[in-house]
Image: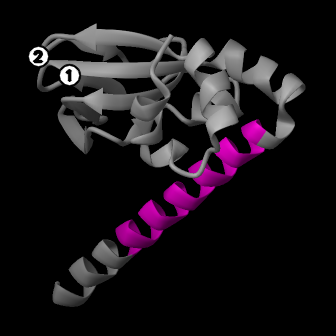
């Protein structure tokens, strides 16, 4: 069982009440990866929503011409794989630990069960995912527009 105070440090779970954190602490699993170890590859089946407890994870994709393109480097507190709990899909990118890293996994099967047993808690998680994704999209749009203007 994961300690609730560790879950509370996650960007995604900051607004979850103590009761909700206790429920999550029973279903979230802990994983450790060494520097350079691959978490998953493009086209692998998804497992669920990953939360970075410590270390850093690089998310990358191979371009059509064979180059690896870094999409994001995620430090402690951040999350990835969120689409795997929303839709049934395979990974569209790869993930590698770029430092010794500890992750929490909210398995998609457990999240589906949570949606049946505690819809309010599941809704809070999905709402927080939407807020963070929206913020990230706005930042990417701003960077894109700045690059266009300076070009």
Q: In this view, does 143 lie to the left or right of 91?
A: left
Q: How crowded is mark 2: few (under 14 residues within 10 Å), some or many (20 or more)?
A: some
Main SS, magenta region, reads helix
Which numbered marker is on residue 146?
A: none
- Corner quadrant of residue 140: bottom left
Q: Which quarter of the rendering shows the C terminus?
A: bottom left
How far separated are the C-alphas under marks 2 and 1? 5 Å
Out of 36 and 109, give the one closest to the viewer. Answer: 109
Image coordinates of residue 86 in percent, x first then y, are 69, 34
Instruction: Please tell me which residue is depicted at 68% across the width and 53% down the height of the picture.
Output: 127
Colouring rule applied to residues? one colour
Q: Mark 2 points at which residue?
A: 35
Out of 45 and 127, give the one closest to the viewer. Answer: 127
Q: Name the residue under label 1.
A: 97
Instruction: Please tell me which residue is depicted at 68% across the width and 34% down the height of the picture.
Output: 20
Out of 143 and 134, give the one closest to the viewer. Answer: 134
* Sequence-earlier tag: 2 or 1: 2
Q: Give the range drawn in magenta.
A: 121-141
Check contact, mark 2 vs mark 1: CB within 8 A: yes
Image coordinates of residue 68 in percent, x first then y, are 19, 32
Instruction: Please tell me which residue is depicted at 27% across the width and 34% down the height of the picture.
Output: 60
Residue 45 part of the magenta segment: no
In the rendered image, the vertical position of residue 145 relative to residue 138, given as above or below: below
Instruction: Label 2, secondary structure: give it.
Output: loop
Residue 132 part of the magenta segment: yes
Q: How crowded is mark 1: few (under 14 residues within 10 Å), some or many (20 or more)?
A: many
- Corner quadrant of residue 35: top left
């Amino acid at each position: 069982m994961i300690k609730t105070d560790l879950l509370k440090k996650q960007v995604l779970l900051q607004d979850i009440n103590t009761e909700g954190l206790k429920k999550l602490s029973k279903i979230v699993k802990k994983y450790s990866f060494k520097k350079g170890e691959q978490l998953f590859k493009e086209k692998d089946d998804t497992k669920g929503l990953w939360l970075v407890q410590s270390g850093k994870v690089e998310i990358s994709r191979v371009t059509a011409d064979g180059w690896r393109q870094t999409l994001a480097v995620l430090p402690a507190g951040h999350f990835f794989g969120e689409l795997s709990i929303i839709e049934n899909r395979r990974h569209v990118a790869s993930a590698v630990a770029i430092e010794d890293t500890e992750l929490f996994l909210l398995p998609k099967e457990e999240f589906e069960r949570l949606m049946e047993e505690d819809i309010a808690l599941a809704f809070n998680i999905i709402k927080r995912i939407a807020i963070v994704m929206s913020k990230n999209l706005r930042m990417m749009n701003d960077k894109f527009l700045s690059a266009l203007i300076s070009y």
